[in-house]
Image (cartoon, rainbow, N blue to C red):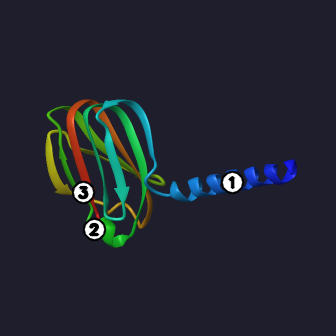
Amino acid sequence: MKKKFALVWVLVLLAVVLAGCTSSRTGTWSISGSHTGLQRSVNDEGLSISGRTMNGRFTTNVELNAGNLAAFHVESSNSSGKASILLTQGNVERSFDISGAFSDNLDMGAFGAGRISVRFVFESAENVDIVISWG
């Protein structure tokens, strides 16, 4: 009986670990900093992040195809402080200042289809609302 019980727990733990690995392909956030009122999401159409106060780095990975890269559009606003996006793929890194009111397609010509790291860097930013669409 104890062996069956232990085996069931091992199988449940394995299933949880495998589910975590597959769900972390996109949508998982790494946060290094402080925030209040943080809201964030990632889906097939884009991502969003918002908060009342934000300081530090907020990073996620996304998988983009050529069409997504061509349509990569940022809508951003914050009432004070600084906000920027750092995009990384392999050895390619591009930084964009999106402080204040920002609405534009980003030049994604240096990137290829595949996984891209999206890092938001905030310095004493307040009333942040960022939506990136690519779908």
Query: Label 3 to label 1, Cα distance in Å?
Result: 44 Å
Q: Is residue 82 left or right of residue 120?
A: left
Determine the residue located farthest toward the front in the rendered image.
1
Q: Amino acid at mark 3?
A: Leu
The percent position of residue 29, horizontal first and vertical second, equals 43, 45
- The quarter holding residue 64 reads bottom left
- Identity of the residue drawn at 33% across and 46% down: 40
Element under disc 3: loop
First in sequence, mark 3 or 1: give its number: 1
First in sequence, mark 1 or 2: give its number: 1
First in sequence, mark 2 or 3: give its number: 2
Q: Amino acid at mark 1?
A: Val
- Residue placed under numbered mark 1 in the picture: 12
Badge 2 crowding class, 10 Å Cα cut-off, few under 14, some 14 to 19, many 20 or more, is some
Badge 3 crowding class, 10 Å Cα cut-off, few under 14, some 14 to 19, many 20 or more, is some
The percent position of residue 41, horizontal first and vertical second, equals 35, 51
Along the line of sight, which residue is nearer the eye, 133 or 109?
Answer: 133
Along the line of sight, which residue is nearer the eye, 102 or 52?
Answer: 52
Element under disc 2: helix
Along the line of sight, which residue is nearer the eye, 15 or 63?
Answer: 15
- The quarter holding residue 32 reads top left
Q: Is residue 106 left or right of residue 102?
A: right
Give the number of the disc on residue 70. 2
The percent position of residue 126, horizontal first and vertical second, equals 21, 31
Badge 1 crowding class, 10 Å Cα cut-off, few under 14, some 14 to 19, many 20 or more, is few
Q: Amino acid at mark 2?
A: Ala
Query: Label 2 to label 3, Cα distance in Å?
Result: 9 Å
